[in-house]
Image (spheres, rainbow, N blue to C red):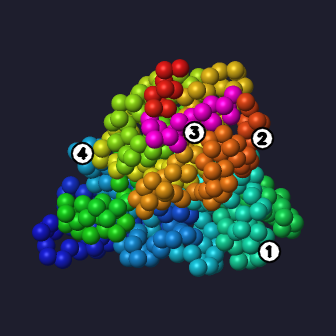
Amino acid sequence: MSAASASPETLGPALLGRLPASVQQPAYDRAALAPGMAHVGVGAFHRCHQAEYTDDLLSLRFDRWGVVGINIRPPSLADTLGRQGGLYTRLIRENSRIEARVIGSIVKVVDSQASAVPALDVLSSPDIELVTMTVTEKGYCHIPSSGELDLDHPDIVHDLVSPETPRSVPGILAKALELRRTTHGQPLTLLSCDNIPANGVILANVVQAFAKRRGNGLADWISANAAFPSAMVDRIAPAVTQADLDSVEQRFGYRDAAVVVGEPFRQWVIEQKFAGRMPRWDLVGASFVDDVTPYEHLKMRVLNGAQTTLATLGVLAGLEHTFDAIADPLLADFVRRMLVEETLPTLMPVPGVSPLAYVEQSLGRLRNTAIRHRNHQIATDGSQKIVQRLLNPIRDRLSRGESIALLSVPVAGWMAYLIQASARFGKRWPVSDPCAGKVADIADATGHDAKALAAGILAIDTIFDPGLAANERFRAAVTSALDGLLSNDPMATVRHSLQQ
Ligand code: CS2
């Protein structure tokens, strides 16, 4: 097809076979795929990660594992992937290099935003043996500091009263498992692919806590018939922009409303704990292991820790993207020293991985200028991210009497970001975080006095467990960093922390 045609066609099954040679396309017969697994939360990350692994596997050895993509929150899938027969373009970008591939593993999409019924129909079907999910940190309705179900969460309150019409992820999954139990009894593996520590344990906690409150034997059935493996997932895949969609049309001559853009690096480490058959993702680069914890700590504390640090401090410095923040010599020096001096000593050994090389590789990934990952996007929902990225390594170091001078700066950075980003940058970076309202109230009540502010925020026990919040060294380090970051020269605090 011609890139210069007046009205470009939209990607769909009819266009396969006529795509430009530079766009790779499914090497298997999609029409013969049967839906064998479902994915909840078909955002950029799923399309760039798990769906690509499945596509690799389908190319390698043909079997039935087509994916049914479900969204229980906006956006609607019908108008994008739905119209395109589940097909979309996955761009891998690294500086000036670009590689395009049409992914075919999603065979059907289901919108279940208005009611849980369409999602429940899929999740309770005996054809579905596995459900993967990326529902964001918030989607689990758990308390970040403890990993337990948040019984005060409005959606959980609703679902416990009306379990037949659930809204929350725990409520929908518990209902789906109940339907499986009463209709056919087939087991189910529920594989969280969200970036939270021990994600399988947290998923099991919230589903089981919900099921136990139903009191009808469901929790016991789940224990015997469902598995909740943990997984570490990795690939940087920022929110898609109009420019990304336009770039496919300009380069390749067709329209695609579901483009995703990711970096070359990808990793998937999955705990070997399944309720039934699993796709052999291990044949296409994923790893099945007995314990994902060391991998998870490495990734969340190093790569994600660096991202959150560059994001919050980057916003305070007025910088737009991760690559802008890491191009700043002070921030680059700070983040490397924080990782090497304070984070690395908290990690468990990971087979075959040199921690120092991992740091350099991670920083290299963050320098990729073709991945336009906004600091503001990464800073969003920071309250759900800082526990695993910053507070857990801090807790480990405090227990051994080690310095936390550097790691406490991005913790204060997250606080300063919540307090200042909207006021300083307005609509450009409006803060969005489940704790934003609480922090704003604390700021109003304390008149922006750093000591009172830090004390107020550290008392939010869903983020800071009481033991950590009471630690004098931690309190002093965060208070002093917050004081500096709220001043007119926030970067002086970053500079100063390196001189200590
Ligand atoms: C990012 C992650 O927005 C964020 O919180 O830090 O999405 C990050 O890009 C991925 O975890 C990389 O695997």
Name the disc covering residue 243, or none.
none
Mark toward the start of the polypeptide (1 vs 2): 1
Q: Nearer the viewer, residue 107 or 455?
A: 455
Q: CA distance from mark 1 to mark 2?
A: 31 Å
Q: The N terminus lies in which quarter of the figure? A: bottom left
Q: Position of residue 439 (x, y in %)?
A: 63, 53
Q: Is mark 2 within 8 Å of ligand 1?
A: no
Query: In this rendering, which labeled residue sits more in front, label 3 or label 4?
Result: 3
Q: Nearer the viewer, residue 395 or 260?
A: 395
Identified by mark 1, the residue type is Val
Identified by mark 3, the residue type is Leu
Q: Residue at x 35, y 42 (%)?
A: 323
Q: Residues within 10 Å of mark 1 (few under 14, many from 20)?
A: few
Asked whether, in this view, residue 496 is left or right of residue 12, the answer is right
Mark toward the start of the polypeptide (1 vs 4): 4
Mark toward the start of the polypeptide (3 vs 4): 4
Q: Residue at x 45, y 44 (%)?
A: 316
Q: Which residues are magenta?
A: 473-491
Query: In this rendering, which labeled residue sits more in front, label 1 or label 4?
Result: 1
- The residue identified by callout 2 is 466
- The residue identified by callout 1 is 161
Identified by mark 4, the residue type is Arg
Q: CA distance from mark 1 to mark 4?
A: 53 Å
Looking at the image, is 489 positioned above or below residue 158? above
State whether residue 131 appears in this view.
yes
Dots 1 and 4: beta carbons under 8 Å? Answer: no
Identified by mark 2, the residue type is Pro
Main secondary-structure element of the magenta-colored stretch: helix
Q: Nearer the viewer, residue 415 or 29?
A: 415
Q: CA distance from mark 4 to mark 2?
A: 48 Å
Name the disc covering residue 97, or none.
4
